[in-house]
Every structure is written in structure tokens, then in C-alpha cells.
Amino acid sequence: MKKSKKVLIVTYYWPPAGGPGVQRWLKFAKYLREFGWEPIIYTPENPSYPLVDETLIKEVPENLKIVKTNIWEPYQLAEKFSKSNKKFKGGQFDVGKNQSLMSKLSIFIRGNFFIPDARKFWVKPSIQFLKQYLKENNIDVLVTTGPPHSLHLIGLGLKKELPNLKWIADFRDPWTEISYYKHLKLTSSSDKKHRQLEKSVFENADLTLATSYTDAENFKKNGANAFCITNGFDKENTSTPLSVTNGKVKFTLSYVGVLEQLRNPENLWKALENLCKINSDFSKDFELKFVGRIDDKILNEIKSSILKNNIRNLGYIAHNDSVNEMQNSDLLLITNFPNGTSKGIIPGKLFEYLATGKQIISFGPKDADVETILDKTKAGKHFDYSEIKEIENYILSLYENWKSGTSIHNEANINEFSRKELTKKLSELLNKI
């Protein structure tokens, strides 16, 4: 039997980390062995995760080698100054009128003193440790995945120490093109340093992976040998049986995941308020369900509106339970940042949404990659942040079909987005380099 080749994956997020950041490489690790690659994980011993989901530990492949070293992070110190600093761990920020003086100071420090991010203190110790580990264990390919993008500096340092090392830099989100980058209050010298580091990663990695078509093209323009492998869904996690929650039958619009102020679809809330005002049946039948971590300021604003009696907030729950809540919905909400530079962001939960067969309503810039996928699969509708009446009409048409018993399921052909198919694509790139 042919011996498997080894790929060492450097990742900050690993079970019991919760949220979307852990899913991509957990699923790749699950299927890589089927394509002739043995994954080995390198991750912190004592990370400070913004979300924890103990159930994901069950999804770690059997006999997977996991190597850990200690990391020092400044978040515990930062959280003593302000509880709102907890948001920074997940890339969340107060913006506009919600930004206090302490918040502004914290953001300035985060952007200018921790370049590229607050996990930077793990870089040098990891280079020192992995330099020897790579030699002793005959690793064929190194993968670094970010954010946090400081992990790419581990790959960059190792590439300089070991020029023959094959290195893949995986960008789950962009670095300087991510929407919150402009909110970091960077000095010109800090901005320059971020961009220089990013360029060095692009130019030195043998391969740069993007999770969207637009990001891959942008990375190529900046000197990267870039390819797109999107996120996806795992067929084994999509067969959750349906059930009626709370004993109620409601026309349910659900948001699953983390919703921060920068992606707040205020025009959707306005459209829903209008529908509740003009249509008493809709107001009685409608449920707005949140599953995950919703920014308190967003939640409080909705609770102070006419929608307050339609809200069901479940908070953060185990991943498998969140999939069940997707199944128990009629319409699934996905949001992106409104500016054009974010059109390449494809949130990972889009693919789990697709796998449910439910209709999807999306918000973001025009011509976004999410819109391309929804149009291709005919699984839903994409809107920008200026539309209101069009949103009302779309939701009302779905509600009327629901009310009359007409199916509002989509029949999307989505096999290309299964985790196993995506891992096959990854293995082909690993073989090439």
C-alpha cells in the first residue's frame, strides 16, 4: 500500500473552539486520509477562544496527531479594562455612535501595537519549535490558516529558514481587505507594515488559498499564486430530523452565527416592521429566531421595536443543534459587510444553509460571490443594504406560499460544495506542489 504523505496544519482554531473558524480544517482533516494525505495539527495548548463548542471534539478524526505548545495572549489583560474587548477576539468592534472613548483606545492599541494581531507572540516560539519538528518528522507540506494572520508569519519564518519547504497560506478571510481593517485606526506606518507583511506572505507561499472567487483574484493581483477552495457542508451533518420547536408552527426567519454591528441589516428589520404593521396574519405567524451570538446593541434595538414579540433568541448552542435549528426554519438569513471590497466574502454557514434546502435571504454589496452562488443554485435572493420594498415583497411572497401550504424548499444542485469533494480538490493541489 502506498505510504501517505504528511501535511502539517498550523491553526489557532481547533476543537473545542466553536464558531466558523474551526470548521474548514477540521473537515479537511476528516477526509484527507481518503486522498493519500496524513494530517497533523499544530495548535496552541492554552488558547483564548471567543466561543467554545465541546461537541466538536467528537468530530476530530481518530488517531489524529495533534501537537501543542503554549501561547501568550494579551486578551485577559485587555478584558480587565473593558468587557467589550472580548469582541476583539472574534474580529468584532463597536462602531459609530456605539463607540466609547475606551473602545476607541482599545481599537487603536489593537491595530497599532499588535501587528498583525494579538496572537503575534506565538510566532517566534512556533518557528523555533517547528523548524526542528519539520526536519525530524519528514513533513511534505506546511499549511498555515488565518485569521489570525499572525499564523502566516510562522509559515513565512519557516520558509526563510527552510527554503525547500512547501508552504500553503490559507486565507479564510482577507487580511488588509477585510472590512474591519479600516476601523483599526491605523497610523500610516502601521498600515504600511500590515501591507508589507501581507505581500511577503503572498510572494513567498508556494500556494495561497482563498475561500471565494473574488478573493483569489485579488490575491493574484498582489503577487500570490492563488486558488479558490470555498467552504462547504458535510453530508454527515445534514440529516438531522425535523421537529416542531416549542410546539408552535411559525413562519420562521433564522440567523445562525455571530452578528456584529458592521453586518447589521437594518433595512431587513425595517421591512419586517412594515410587514408586521400592515399584515396582522404575518405579525401573528412570524418568528425571528437568533441562534448564536448577536451583538447586544443590535438585539436591544430590535427588542425596542414592534418586532419585540416575534423574537426568539437561543444564544450560542452546539453546532449540531444549530443545524437542527436551520432545519426548523423557513427562511435563513446571511449578512455580509456592505462595502464593495467585501463582495468576495462567502460566510461558511452559506453552505450549511444550502444543504438544508431552505430558502436563503442574503445582504451585502451588489455582484457579491454569495449572490453568484445563490443565482447558480437558485436557492434564494440577495439584496443590498438600500432595498426595503423589494425585501418586503420577497418575504411576503414566501410567507403567502407557506400559509397556503405550497413548498418553499429549493432543489439546489450543491454536491460540488460537499466537504469531501472540496478535500479532493485540496489533495490535488497538495500533490501538484
Image (spheres, rainbow, N blue to C red):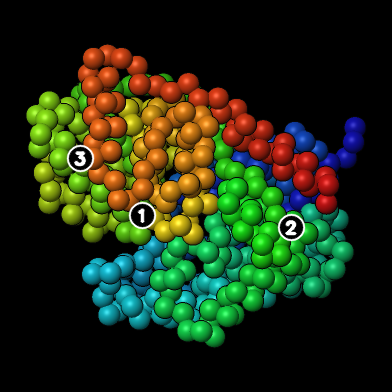
Q: Quadrant of the N terminus?
A: top right
Q: Which residue is mark 2?
A: 225
Residue 331 vertical position relative to residue 27 in the rendered view, above or below: above
Residue 424 vertical position relative to residue 411 in the rendered view, above or below: below
Q: Which residue is mark 1?
A: 263
SS of the residue under disc 2: loop
Q: Residues within 10 Å of mark 1 (few under 14, many from 20)?
A: some
The residues bearing labels 1 and 2 have C-alpha atoms spaced at a distance of 30 Å
Q: Residue at x 35, y 21 (%)?
A: 408
Report the front residue among 422 and 406: 406
Q: Is residue 242 left or right of residue 423?
A: left
Of labels 1 and 3, earlier in sequence is 1
Q: Outermost residue, right direction?
A: 1
Asked if one can make out residue 125 in the rendered structure from this viewpoint, the answer is: no
Kind of residue at disc 2: Asn
Kind of residue at disc 3: Leu
Residue 64, image x, y percentages: 69, 44
Q: Outermost residue, top direction?
A: 405
